[in-house]
Amino acid sequence: MIAAPFTAERVSPALIEGVARRLCSDVALLYIDAPDDVVRARLESRNAARDRVKLSRVADQANPAALVPQAIVIDGRVAVDEQVAEALHALGRPERRHRTDSQAASC
């Protein structure tokens, strides 16, 4: 799993395919969507220095570009455990499973 903004990739099927090729794996784009007020409240409650710039940009991201068609949109208004359950369900995985480095296949 890779967590990142992937700002350009989330709107470009070709870029998502490029990520998959670089990782030698299938890639699923999970997009957590939440209203501006929810994002702002969470950033403010976290009160992290790294979020100061994000707080100034929350309103600017109100209308993001259209996502790639295969994006899986997760409801960001619900609790994190519910988001994880929703993601796992969308990915067809009934439970969380982690591979160890020794289990990871190289390509």
Image: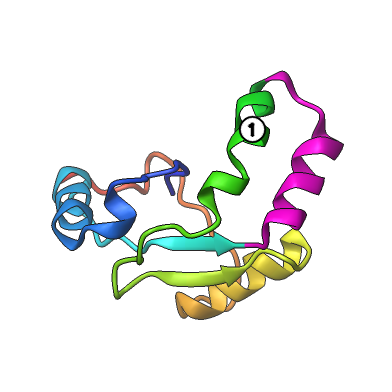
Work out which residue is located at the far right of the displayed protein and give it. Answer: 45
SS for callout 1 = helix
Q: Residue 76: image x %, image y %?
A: 66, 63
Q: How crowded is mark 1: few (under 14 residues within 10 Å), some or many (20 or more)?
A: few
Q: Residue 1: image x %, image y %?
A: 44, 49
**Residue 38: within the magenta?**
yes
Q: At x 13% / y 57%, what residue is drawn?
A: 14
Q: At x 19% / y 62%, what residue is drawn?
A: 13
Q: Residue 41: image x %, image y %?
A: 81, 47
Q: Quadrant of residue 49?
A: top right
**Residue 15: within the magenta?**
no
Q: At x 76% / y 68%, what residue is drawn?
A: 78
Amino acid type of the residue tagged 1 in the rendering:
Ser
Q: At x 59% / y 64%, what residue is drawn?
A: 96
Q: Mark 1 points at which residue?
A: 56
**Would you place residue 55 above or below residue 103 in this image?**
above
Work out which residue is located at the far top of the displayed protein and give it. Answer: 49
- Horizontal side of 99 relative to 53 (left or right) equals left
Quick one: 35 or 88, which is closer to the camera?
A: 35
- Horizontal side of 20 relative to 77 (left or right) equals left
Quick one: 96 or 85, which is closer to the camera?
A: 85
- Which range of residues does the magenta coloring cover? 34-49
Q: Residue 42: image x %, image y %?
A: 78, 46
Quick one: 64 or 75, which is closer to the camera?
A: 64
